[in-house]
Every structure is written in C-alpha cells, then in structure tokens.
Amino acid sequence: MTSVLDEIGLNRDELRDAIRHEYNEVALNPDKGFHFHTGRKLAGILGYQDEWLANVPETAVSSFAGTGNPFSLGELQPGERVVDIACGAGIDSFIAANMVGEQGYVVGVDMTKPMINKARQALAESGKRNLEFCEGYAEELPVTDGWADVVISNGSLNLMPDKTAVLREVARVLKPGGRVQFGDILVDRPVPAGAKANIDLWTG
C-alpha cells in the first residue's frame, strides 16, 4: 500500500532528522535568532496570559517555539488528564499541569532529545508530580487507549506529513467525548506537490 510519504516523495527519517536539527538548535541555543520568534516574546504575541506563565520555569519558556495558543480554545479543568504532542521544552505542558492541578496529570511527548532533556530539567526545577515527559512520536504515542480527556499540541501537526495517522493516534488515546485543542498553521489553498517534497520548506 502506498504511504502518504511515498506519494509526496519524502523519506520519513530524513524529514524527522531535519526537523530535529532545527529544534535541537532552539533547545540548545534559544537566543540564537531564528526566522520565527521564540520564548517569552512569542508567548506574548500569541496571547499567553501572565498568570499562565507565572509558575512555569524559565528553562521551559526560553525554548518555546509554538505557532498558536491551544488554551485560547478553553482553559483545562481540574482533574483532567492531558497529552501534549510535540511538547518541546514543556511550556504548554507546565501550563496544563497548573490548570488541571494535583488531581490531574499531563504527559508531554517529543521526538527531539535536547527538548525532552530541557523539559525534564525544568520539571526537576519545579518539583511537580502531576507531569512527565516522554521521548516519542505523535504517530506512536506512549499512552494507553482512552486515557486522555484532552490532547493539546502547538505548531506540530503542520510538520507531520501523515496527518491522518497522527489524528488516528489522537483518537485512540482520547476518552469518549474527549477533546482536541491544537494551535497550528493553516493554509487556504493546496500546497503544490513539489513544495511538499522539499524538506527545507517543512523545516522553515
């Protein structure tokens, strides 16, 4: 059976490596200067409230590189269980953990090791017990069936060529009646096949 990657002429491992390279830099050198905003400045641009950031370690805030605001779709409720796909250094995971409180729980998942390491460093600084970070892929979430009340993500679905596979995995981990709160990039016209096959355009 032909895969989405075959149809657009992309090698999944090469694409993942290119994306990792970009976000390794954001994790390790957040002040380097990128073609996109990062950190606390970006959070302000995207409408993150000051009280959301008040209890988030700067280690997590500094490498923020999202494209939207999943919490603009509604604040999370105490006691909810949350999966954060492509959590990066963990800013949205920390905000979610603060919203759901001690009776809730958040699992952040990312494929970029320096980001996960930075998120875990921030977690150690915070002492939070209702949050964990796992290395993994959106297409293979390390979460059991029907566990989550909410799945959040910020600026990641656009980087994944097989969006159907990702959304199928989201549906697997959500409880019946669960919800999705994604902040991402949308286009209003089809992307040409040649552009889809250009890895440089996926990463920048």
Image (spheres, helix red, strand yellow):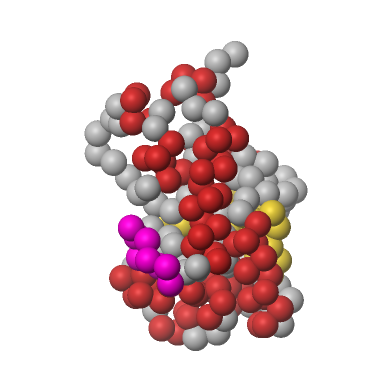
Q: Is residue 176 left or right of residue 62?
A: right
- Answer yes or no: is residue 83 visible: no
Q: Which residues are magenta?
A: 31-38
Q: Is residue 113 left or right of residue 61?
A: right
Q: Is residue 139 left or right of residue 190?
A: right
Examine the image and state in which quarter residue 158 appears. top left
Examine the image and state in which quarter residue 182 appears. bottom left
Residue 162 percent location from the top left of the image: 51, 33
Q: Residue at x 33, y 31 (%)?
A: 195
Q: Residue at x 53, y 51 (%)?
A: 21
Above or below, comparing residue 93 to residue 151 in the picture? below
- Answer yes or no: is residue 127 visible: yes
Question: Dividing the image into 4 quarters, which one contains the N terminus?
Answer: top right
Question: 31 or 5, which lies in front?
Answer: 31
Residue 8 percent location from the top left of the image: 44, 23
Quick check: is 122 in the magenta stretch? no
Q: Residue at x 67, y 82 (%)?
A: 125
Above or below, comparing residue 125 to residue 12 in the picture? below
Residue 131 percent location from the top left of the image: 69, 70
